[in-house]
Amino acid sequence: MTLEQIAGAALMVLFLADVFLTVLYARAGTGLLAPVWNRCVWALFKGIAGVFGRGRTTILSFAGPVIVICLIAFWALGLTLGAALVIQPELGTAIRPSSGGTSTEFVTALLVAGNSLSIVGGGDYSPHSSGTRLLFLLNSLIGASVLSLVLSYLVQVYSALRERNVLAMTVHQLTGETGDAAEMLARLGPDGDFSNATSELSNLVRSLVMTKEAHHFYPLLFYFRFSDPLYSVSRFSFVLLDLTTLTGTTLDQQAYGAFVRSAPVGALQRSALLLLKTLDRHFPTQSDAHASVNPGNYAAATETLQRAGISVRPNIQAYADRRRQWEPLVRSVAPTMGYDMDEIDCRRASHEVATLSRVKAWDR
């Protein structure tokens, strides 16, 4: 066995290990080559999207599917290169065509390697020794196995993506399509009746935990970004964390103590934090420790709850303290995916627009 063949075998083992860790072991951050490759493709997309200004959201929305294609091509190319290095020294001797001369160029070795890895096969070159026959058999088994594993992996990724979108749309609808956690809380407890709220939140906790685990098992989900911010992890995580923060710091504890201290409220907050921490740990996020609470923003949330007939005891300091515990995570993840905080914090955006309108009216 030549040094070239040893290098080729080592290259194939390296790529097979990467496929194993990415597809079968399925843990975020455990891949050898795939995580770095995916980040490079994502960085390329972000660089290209930055040139298009407002069109960047459309460009970034193609990143996820393209990263999938690039990852499959990356694995296929790596395995083919490895097999070609093993095959080339055997060209013209143990591996040759049925008729005519034998080319020993590396391009020919790539062609033979690709055919041997393909489940379709084909080509004029065939093995003529026991060792090369076993090599071609092994290559065909590797090609068929990797293809089956990758296809099943992609089915799971897109199934998890659909479930994530369902969760995001559910949260959006519960806010009355406003993206405001105060509106969601008001709809969960109309006229101060939170008797059905715990069951609603329990369903959200179940979906949120499934989404968190999906991102842990299938890191490719990190790179799927939709043009509409309502589908972003940052948006629905922000809404759910803001919801639990308002619940614990603004609702009347005497009137709604059982709901405030209920298990679903605490589980919802912890699950949303775990999801954001998973993204922040395994995704190329940017650090942003900034967190601020606008008194007008908090007053708008309080007014929304009061209009719904909910008894409140506002405590802006407690609200601000709790918000500082999780808002930096949102501010780290959101810009990395190309979202502005005004797209994530819809109540702040609405309040700023309303304030600007009043200022313009006073100026007139």
Image (spheres, grey):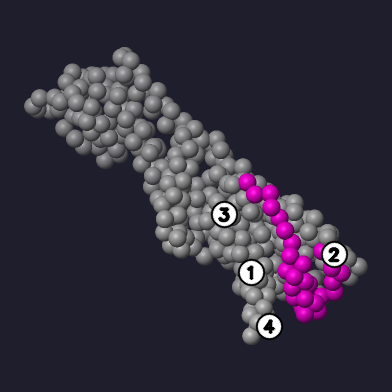
Q: Is residue 17 above or below residue 156?
A: above
- Percent position of residue 34, x then y: 46, 38
In the image, which is nearer the foreground, mark 1 or mark 4? 4
Callout 3: helix, strand or loop?
helix
Q: Which residue is under mark 3?
A: 335
* Amino acid type, callout 3: Pro
- Residue 329 appears left or right of 260: left
Which residue appears at 28% of the width and 19% of the height? Answer: 131
- Percent position of residue 68, x then y: 42, 47
Return the disc, 3 or 1, that comes first in the chain's sequence: 3
Return the disc, 1 or 4, that comes first in the chain's sequence: 1
Q: Could you give the CA–CA distance between mark 1 and mark 2, rounded to whole angstroms? A: 22 Å
Which residue appears at 77% of the width and 64% of the height? Answer: 246
User: In front here: 311 or 21?
Assistant: 311
Q: Which residue is under mark 2?
A: 315
* Amino acid type, callout 1: Ala
